[in-house]
Amino acid sequence: MASLCLSPLVRSPRGQWRETLPTCKLERYYLDDTDMTLHYSISGLEFFCSNSKTAVYKGSLKLPDQEDASVFEHEADMYEIHLRDLQDRVIPHCYGLFQYNAEDGKVSSFLVLGDCGSPIDDPRNFTNLYKSKVIDAVYFIHFAGFTHGDLSYHNILNKDGCPFIIDFETAKPHVCGVKEKLFIGEERKELGCTEMMRCAALVRAWANSYVKLEGIYTFLRVDLRRGNMDYLLSHLRHCNSDPTVYRPYVEQLVEQVEARRERYRNIPLEERLIVPE
């Protein structure tokens, strides 16, 4: 029989959760017939965050001689079965789901996950490499045949520059429609998957929709194309009665944008295709 001991008196600053956690041994909940004699303990518990249904506490886990992984009943299938190969790569390591039967008959469940850092903050601080890692993490989950279902900043943790996805309460089976890799900085396009579009928006993967001609005008990126010069210059009539004086500057801007487009168009096909590892 596996058990878990908790340190006493964990208090929620918001007053939304029970002010103390049980300090007796908790019995582990198993999804199958597996049963092992393992004893875990957690000390230094602190309130981390909460939503309307669950609370998260952080603490130091003392490991037994062996390790195992399991989670809340629906999430258990995700971590333990469907996404098991992604543990310690793009999702946390899970040490088990433990349950406590209170005297009032209510059952409290405690999910123990490996520490994977803190929720991401301002995406404007992300490097292109980190953005790519977040996108890849979601890709891998989709490769496994599931969509996360609640992809948001508070469900993406950052640990030493590596993203970890958590909270699979609303995860569902999914056949991803994405066929090409998303490259950071390319223009917005339809990916064939709603969640991947959301992921791209979260990390601000797309190039800016607007491009400035410094001190003169801000153009829509989509309009900055060769052969579109007359249309672009027409927007500058309010700046000068003869907008052709700006032609060299607009042409330079167009060439910069078109060069970036061509860079993405010339990416080899084998690099564009998404092939799960």
Image (tube, rainbow, N blue to C red):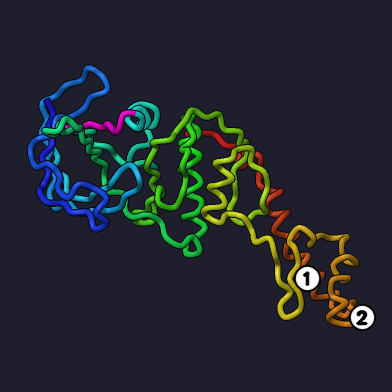
Q: Which residue is depicted at the point 60% across and 37% down?
A: 178
Range of residues picked out in magenta: 65-73
Q: Report which residue position mark 1 lands on.
A: 252
Q: Which residue is depicted at the point 65% across and 61% down?
A: 208
Q: Residues within 10 Å of mark 2 (few under 14, many from 20)?
A: few
Q: CA distance from mark 1 to mark 2?
A: 18 Å
The amino acid beneath tag 2 is Asp
Q: Which residue is depicted at the point 31% across and 53% down?
A: 117
Return the residue found at the far top. 33
Residue 105 image position (x, y, % from top left)? 16, 30
Residue 61 image position (x, y, % from top left)? 16, 45
Q: Left or right of 209: which side holds 81?
A: left
Q: Secondary structure at mark 2?
A: loop
Q: Left or right of 261: which side holds 200?
A: left
Decide whether residue 200 is among the magenta residues.
Answer: no
Mark closer to the observer (1, 2): 2
Q: Left or right of 22: which side holds 241?
A: right
Is 26 placed above or below 123 here? above
Is 13 placed above or below 147 here? below
Is 204 placed above or below 20 here? below
- Mark 1 or mark 2, which has the lower sequence index? 2
Q: Report which residue position mark 2 lands on.
A: 242
Marks 1 and 2 close (CB-CB < 8 Å): no
Decide whether residue 66 is among the magenta residues.
Answer: yes
Do we see residue 121 in this rendering? yes
Residue 224 image position (x, y, % from top left)? 78, 62
Q: Secondary structure at mark 1?
A: helix
